[in-house]
Structure formats: structure tokens, C-alpha cells
Image: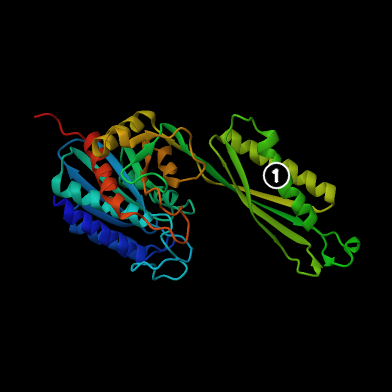
Amino acid sequence: MNLEQLIADMQAWRRHLHANPEFGFEEKGTAAFVAEKLREFGLDDVSEGVGGTGVVGTLKRGSANRSIALRADMDALRIPEQSNLSYRSRNPGVMHACGHDGHTAMLLGAARMLAEDGGFDGTVRFVFQPAEEWGKGALAMIDDGIMERFPFDEIYGIHNMPGLPVGHFQTRPGAIMSAEDNFEIVLSGLGGHAARPNATNEVLVAACALVVNLQTIVARRLDPTDIAVISVTELLTDGTRNALPGTARILGDCRSFHPSVSAEIEKQMRIIADGTALSYNVGVKVDYTREFVPLLNDPELADEAFAAAADIVGADNVSRRAEPMTASEDFARFLDFVPGCFVFLGNGEQSKPLHNPSYDFNDDGLIHGANFHAGIARRRLAQPPV
């Protein structure tokens, strides 16, 4: 394996993907690009259209029945890019603001490494997943039979992390990323002229009170040892400058790490919404959905991931997160079926944040991610001693 050539190729692939981003379940060009590369590498099987636009590549060596999966996400975000990069997005209003272009390029690099050099005994599944950003892609692949059609015993994934130095890995056993629940609360009353609020049953004051009251759930209604976040992100009404609204919509999301906490948040939200509506004499409807489940790393496989990363970058550049983070990842859906581990790879201390219109994946991290994918495959599918 010519590593210098591989690094150059991964950078070219990554920048091609960055320039041609596609939103979830629209990744037809991305999937075709991935499938073409996997076939060039000589994989045993390349299946397209899994879960809509997903791709699964299969590589077999030796005679062992063991199998692991390596997963990358392919979708971009509906964010207009703000950069002067030569490879900036050519798809207006869509960009790779979360680094999935880098994740895809790293896994392609690992596929070529393992196809050319082997070094394992068993089967590796390369899972290129659509629609991670809105939490539907993993479920779509599962519903399409990925576990039955392309069985594997364990699974690993990588996400880049701004603020973490390049060449540094980080993970933890157990809970590492939170669940995400979404909510929409609709208040209904009677709008009217802004000069005569007494002649209306307007909802804006009730909505403002409800937004404030929701903050008491974490502050006063949950156990202080439980980690939870409730964020109101939108307040929309049908009012205008001189007309009081008769309808208000309050939208947001909640993060937690245990189903019991999620259930308690929903319960308390409904109590507060009903009480606030009653006190302001307006109607209320609460819609509460669970989009992402918590991501729980298998403790044994987390140790294996630590060891694989340390082999690549040295033990001093591998660390354990002290606390789980309240962002979410639908990689967690695969962990309902098999054990696995999700790790973070440094994107540089000066990196723009994820989901920022000026964000860019750091190409210096590509080789580290590819080496991790290949390394964990060889570690978990070790060849028998001669």
C-alpha cells in the first residue's frame, strides 16, 4: 500500500464529496461514487439502494465466520456554505457542515487498505449510511434488512470533533451521546386587534409564559444527578405588528440518557402545558416524539477501540471522555442489535464548530480515521497464528 498516494486520493475524494453535497435520502450521486470506488478496490460484493440510498460493501478473507461492520454517514445539511474554498458546495443551500464527506472518504480509504493488504480473517462490512442528520437513515437500513442480508457481530463508527487536536482519539464506555426527543406545543385562542386585547383571547403571552415554565422541568422536576437539556428553538404565531395572534406554535428538543428521564420530561411537559393553558384560558395540544436513542458503547469493545487507536497514534493521544455529550447520533440504532463502539477523531483546535456555515473537515485527519477503521478490523478479526 502506497500511503502517500492513498492520502492524496482520500483528499481528492473528500473534496469531491464536499463540492457535491446531498441531503438525507437524496445521496444518489454520493452513493454512486462510493459504489464505484468499492468496486474498483475489488470488494467481494457491493450492494446499493440499502435503506433508500445506502451502500454496503463486503470484503472476505480467510475462513473464519466472524464479521464486523464499519460505518460512515454520507448526508449533508441544508445550510448555505460561507467559504471561499476552491471545492466549496456547488449545491446551493446544502453543504457538508458536519464532516460526513470526511467520514465517507476515511472509510473508503480503509476499504482500499484492507482490500489490498488484507491482514484479517473473516468478513468486513463497509456500511455507508444515508440520512443521519435527521435520525432516519440507520432505521431505514435496518428496516430494509441490513442485519439479515449483511449480518455482522459488532460495529464501529467515527465522528470528527472540532476542538480536539488532529491525530487524537476520544471515546468512553457506556453512554457517550444522548437521546433526542422533539416536541411541538400548539396554543389556540382568539386573535384580534392589538389595540383591544380585552376583546381577544390571544396566545402570545401564554406562549411566553410556557417557554419560561418549561425551564423548570430540568431545574426543579428532575433528579439533579440526571443529565437533561430542554431547548425551545422556535416560537411561531399567526400575529402581525398590529394583530394579536390566535395560534402559537412552540417547538424544540430534549436530550437525555435514560428512557425513564425522557418519559418524565414528557410527563412534566404535558402537566405544565395543560396548567399554563388553563391559567390563560387557551387551548393546548402537545406532540412529543423520540427521534434518537442514547448511544451506549459496549465497555469491552470500547477497550478494544482504545487499544486500536493507541496502536495508531500512541496512548498519549487517546483519551476517555469524562462525561457523555448531549448531541445525538443514529449510529445508536445499530447498537440495539449488536455491540459496538463510537469514537471521536480530532478535527483541530482551530476548527469551526459542527453545523457552522464556515466549517470544513480537516484533511490531515483522513489517514488517522482510515487507519483506525482498518486497525480495529484487523484487531477484531485477527488471523490465527501460523
Relative to 295, 232 lies left or right: right
User: Which sits in the foreground, 3 or 36?
Assistant: 3
How did the renderer colour the structure?
rainbow
In this view, 341 is above or below 364: above
Which residue is depicted at the point 41% across and 45% down? 331
Which residue is depicted at the point 41% across and 33% down? 172
Relative to 166, 8 lies left or right: left
Number of on-image labels: 1
Q: Residue 359 in the image: state x and y as whole percent.
A: 42, 58
User: Which sits in the foreground, 362 or 306?
Assistant: 362
Residue that protrudes farthest toward the left in the picture? 386
Residue that protrudes farthest toward the front in the picture? 350
Q: Residue 292 in the image: state x and y as whole percent.
A: 51, 45
Tell me, yes or no, if residue 220 can be seen here: yes
User: Which sits in the foreground, 343 or 382?
Assistant: 343
Tell me the quarter of the picture where residue 204 sits: bottom right
Packing grade of label 1 (10 A; few <14, some 14-19, many >=20) is: some
Q: Residue 267 in the image: state x and y as whole percent.
A: 68, 39
Three-letter residue code for mark 1: Leu
Q: Residue 330 in the image: state x and y as whole percent.
A: 45, 46
Tell me, yes or no, if residue 42 can be seen here: no
Say which quadrant the C terminus sits in: top left
Tell me the quarter of the picture where residue 169 sits: top left
Q: Check disc 1 and report its element: helix, strand or loop.
A: helix
Q: Which residue is mark 1?
A: 214
